[in-house]
Amino acid sequence: MSEQAQTIVVWSKQGCQYCQAVKDYLKEQNLSYTDVDITEQDHLRDVLEAKYGVRYVPVVEIGSRDKRN
């Protein structure tokens, strides 16, 4: 079984202490991630709700739910 690096995406907003704690932890662990800042993009809350049934942050995605090859 080969190991592949998992993609990490952090959905966050400015001023969210929990969001910052997640990002700080990932940095401490030397894990790279992509930050999706929803601060002034309310339509992205709709995306979160459609994907995960939540409208709040932080949300951390690890890997892909898309299993297409």
Image (cartoon, grey):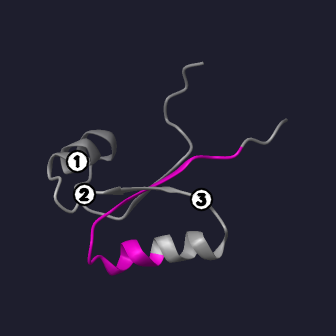
Give yes or no for residue 8 being in the magenta stretch: yes
Compute the Cα span from label 2 to label 1.
6 Å
Which residue is nearer to you in this view: 26 or 54? 26
Which image quarter: residue 57? Answer: bottom left
First reached walking from the N terminus: tag 3 or tag 1: 3
Q: For the residue marked with disc 2, what is the amino acid?
A: Ile
36 lies left or right of 42: right
Find disc 3 in the rendering and name its residue. Answer: 32
Q: For the residue marked with disc 3, what is the amino acid?
A: Ser
Residue 20: numbered disc? none
Residue 38 in the image: state x and y as whole percent. 25, 57
Residue 38: numbered disc? 2
Image quarter of the N terminus? top right
How packed mark 1 is, by other alpha carbons closer than 10 Å (few <14, some 14-19, many 20 or more), is some
Question: Is the Cβ of the residue at disc 2 closer than 8 Å to that at disc 1?
Answer: yes
33 lies left or right of 41: right
Compute the Cα span from label 3 to label 1.
22 Å
How packed mark 3 is, by other alpha carbons closer than 10 Å (few <14, some 14-19, many 20 or more), is few
In the rendered image, the vertical position of residue 45 relative to residue 37, given as above or below: above
Find disc 1 in the rendering and name its residue. Answer: 44
- Image point 27% across, 72% down: which residue? 14
Disc 3 or disc 1, which is closer to the eye? 3
Q: Residue furthest top?
A: 69
First reached walking from the N terminus: tag 2 or tag 3: 3
Q: Which residues are magenta?
A: 5-21
Which residue is nearer to you in this view: 41 or 62? 41
In the rendered image, the vertical position of residue 64 relative to residue 12, given as above or below: above
Identify the secondary structure beneath mark 1: helix
Q: For the residue marked with disc 1, what is the amino acid?
A: Leu
Residue 22 in the image: state x and y as whole percent. 47, 72
